[in-house]
Amino acid sequence: MDTLRPGSSGSQPRTLYQKLVESHTVRRLDDEHVLLYADLHVLNEYTSPQAFAGLREYRRSAWRPEANLAVIDHVNTTRRIAGRRAADEGAALLIDTISRNCREFAIELYDLDDPRQGIEHIVVPEQGLALPGMVIVCGDSHTTTYGAFGALGFGVGTSEVEHVLATQTLVYRRLKNFLINVRGVLPVGVTAKDLIMFVIGRIGAAGANCYAVEFAGEAIAALDMAGRMTVCNMAMECGARAVVMAPDAKTVAYVAARPRSVPEEWLPDAQQFWLGLHSDAGAVFDRTLNLEAAQVEPSVTWGTSPEQVIPIGGAVPDPALEPDPVRRAAIQRSLAYMGLEAGASLSGLRIDRVFIGSCTNGRIDDLRAAAAVIQGHRVAAHVRAMVVPGSWEVRRTAQAEGLADIFTAAGFEWREPGCSMCLAMNDDVLLPGERCASSTNRNFEGRQGRAGRTHLMSPAMAAAAAICGVITDVRRIGG
């Protein structure tokens, strides 16, 4: 068994990612693969049923049920429907199935009537279950969110979900190291969402394939924890299988205040350990990218991939100017699907729907930013807009702070927690041809509904679009 711990001395300087992998390696399998221990396994109703069925078929139990947590978030309705938990029978079956599985295998479940319920990647940090130095896995690709805490989080497939349930380990292929250093200060009116969209546009949807990305630099250090989670959450859209940031005083303060963090008497030692989690001086990265924060602007996607993004003042690309035939064809397909013309501006483009929520931007900080823009305004008459808090805790806080009143007074629908319109897996979907300003993480064809058209942007930008009825530079509103 590998006995190295993060921060311990070694034969050569190591990156934070390497330390996290080495500290959780049960056995080295070959030059590329290890058997990796997972401190926490997060399950949801959508990707877990087959895994539990596999355990049952081979008469296996969950090896460490206390190291697992289940939530319901993908398929539940976010509006009250005569007391129903789901809008259709298929979704109701998934909800009932995970409830039965968790009872049978003694796994804690944040059910829909639990005051801690919400989107998995929001409630886990909110409760203090994501701690620096941990390895966290989940059957969801945006598990990279936990890199904001100096933890190694990544998504796994259904067969791996079953393996982790049975052994608390999985076979893991080690990644190369990629440092993205963001220097300077983000301009006024520019958010963490704009920053990560800028990064994805810069390196492409496959730019970090086979890499673990570490974000560093003054702009990253200046972000609050919500902003860091947004960056780590969406960084997997450029292919990153793992994303990490070194913990600092902000990390420690956030974690220490959570209800299920380490016991108070352990905090001094824990804080000392957490602050020691960083890449060593002289650690070698396989790739390094230096970016200037001053270059980032409020951004919007124009196509059907998160990499197809431009600043709000930019123009939709012209496929005729793209020399690569594969990329040219992709641009042409995206323009056709989105109903856009080459060279067009997104500013002033009419929208039908606005969605503020998701594991990327459904935190209380995101709702505060959107409410600051909305206050004193009304949603455009032709726009249907909704806000879906990421958890019941977020919803309660927003109501206590008066944010819910601001949204409802402006004409927004104020919903209950869930993934909602982030993905067409529940009753919150776009109609064919509807155009949506969305604070989510993906704009694939059909992602929010068959033939729906999604433009990704920050919550503040989405709020501005709701007011104006068109995609708008939020800086012109002054929120």
Image: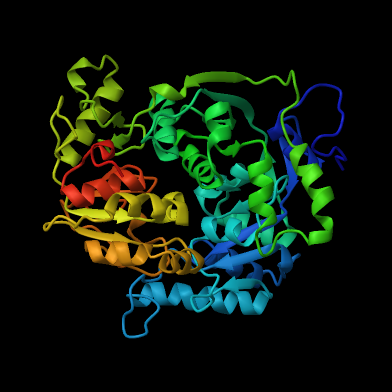
Please tell me which residue lies in front, 331 or 158.
Answer: 331
Q: Residue furthest bottom?
A: 82
Q: Residue at x 20, y 26 (%)?
A: 315
- 190 shown above or below 456: above
- 211 shown above or below 133: above
- 185 shown above or below 148: above
> What scheme was used to colour the molecule?
rainbow
The percent position of residue 145, horizontal first and vertical second, equals: 55, 46
When asked about the image quadrant of residue 11, the answer is top right
Question: Can the viewer see residue 320 in this picture?
Answer: yes
The percent position of residue 158, horizontal first and vertical second, equals: 56, 56
Q: Residue at x 37, y 85 (%)?
A: 83
When asked about the image quadrant of residue 159, the answer is bottom right
Quadrant housing the N terminus: top right
Please tell me which residue lies in front, 447 or 225.
Answer: 225
Judge left or right: residue 131 versus residue 2: left
Q: Residue at x 36, y 71 (%)?
A: 77
Please tell me which residue lies in front, 116 or 479.
Answer: 479
Q: Number of numbered discs present?
A: 0
The percent position of residue 35, horizontal first and vertical second, equals: 75, 45
The percent position of residue 339, horizontal first and vertical second, equals: 14, 39
